[in-house]
Image: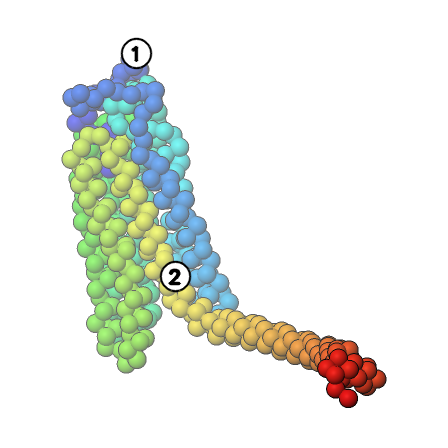
Amino acid sequence: MAPLAADSSVPIGFFPSPPPGNTPLATPPPGVTPNFDHPESNSWHVNVTAAICIPLIVIFSSLRLYTQYRLRPSRTIADYTFMLAAAWTVIYIAILLALLNKGLFGRHIWDLKVEDLSNPPFLLVLILEAIYGPFVWIIKVSLFCLYRQIFTPKPYLQHLALAGIIVTGLFYWSSLVAAVVLCSPRRNETYIMAFATARCGETKGLGVIIGVFNVLSDLYLLVIPIPATLALHLPRRKKIALLFLFATGILAFNASALGLHYRVQVNRSYDDTWKVMPMYLTVIIEMTAGIAILCMPAMATLSRRYTPAVTAYFSRNNKDSNENEQSRFYEMAKQRNVSHSSNARTFEAQGSNMYGHTATSSSDSANEFRPHTSDSVTFAEKLSRASGSP
């Protein structure tokens, strides 16, 4: 990627000093007016992606290192290449964020003034171009070493992985040499002038070639373990789990394919400072996916080691909770029974008193309306006299 290719409309590398006034770095498209005061920027996409991916890299790497030093006594070359890959990935993202902090990239090239240019941003771009190949290569080396470690009884896969290490190494280290040779300042050149030359502009086509190679190498990494995995004498469930582990590489493959798309766009456009941002975003995702794939075996080891203990812990807590709940239930039922018994005795006593008082009252009422004997005789005599009876 050459942010200032030779086809830019203003050959800024040949200005001995910034011209007066607000001179745009390139001629805008028809109908577009340069915006120097409040320019649009798409660098925030890269910032957000980096803010998500860096913690993921740290978490996955920490879990892998814990497994590596606490649960496995032996070390392999894949362990050492992984540590190097994780460190280099974080360094690459840090340099990219430092570049974005300069405020030059992420804006349209016609929203930049010639006097805004300085050498440090272009030095960072050259560093990113140079180290990209070796950094991606060390991630792929770690993956090939992981294959060699897992499929030790498969000689053909050992040879395929070794061939992948050699071929990718030759290509990616050659890209470092090409970036340094094409875009480094020559005699009496500044970094700005070097990036404005036709020779540095050729790195845009080199970027497309790198994108194609990324897709092919990721596809190679994705395919070669499948036959060996299917041939293993494992239960179907474990085979599916192992295939899923390698299928995580689909994320890296998709990121590299999308990166190729954006590299083609950069190659076809002179608005490099804007078009390059989506490409950087896919680079971060591709590197993070590679680190995550390398950590998957460690995650499986941690799962086998601690899942039974965690399950037992939660089962014990659930059992204790159920027992406590049953105890509370029995206690509430006991209190409810005691309360019912007390209420029954109280009700019985109240009923006895009530019915005893009622019987007495009924007897008294009957006696009240029943005439006494003496009163009955007197009444009969009076009745007999009144009727004239003897």
| Quadrant of the image containing the C terminus | bottom right
In x, y percent, where is residue 358?
Answer: 73, 78
Report how far apart the C-alphas of labels 2 and 1 lie in the structure.
54 Å
Looking at the image, which residue sits at the far top? 20
| Quadrant of the image containing the N terminus | top left
Residue 295: numbered disc: 2
Q: Earlier in the sequence, mark 2 or mark 1?
A: 1
Query: Is the residue marked by circle 2 packed among few (<14), some (14-19), or many (20+) residues within 10 Å?
Result: many
Disc 2 marks which amino acid?
Cys
Residue 257: numbered disc: none
Q: Is residue 336 visible?
A: yes
Query: CB under 8 Å between callouts 2 and 1?
Result: no
Above or below, 210 against 295 in this view is above
In x, y percent, where is residue 184?
Answer: 28, 33
Disc 1 marks which amino acid?
Gly
Q: Residue at x 30, y 46 (%)?
A: 283
Indicate left or right for 62 with 355 as reference.
left
Above or below, 380 against 3 in this view is below
- Label 1 sits on residue: 21
Query: Depth check: 347 or 185 in front?
Result: 347
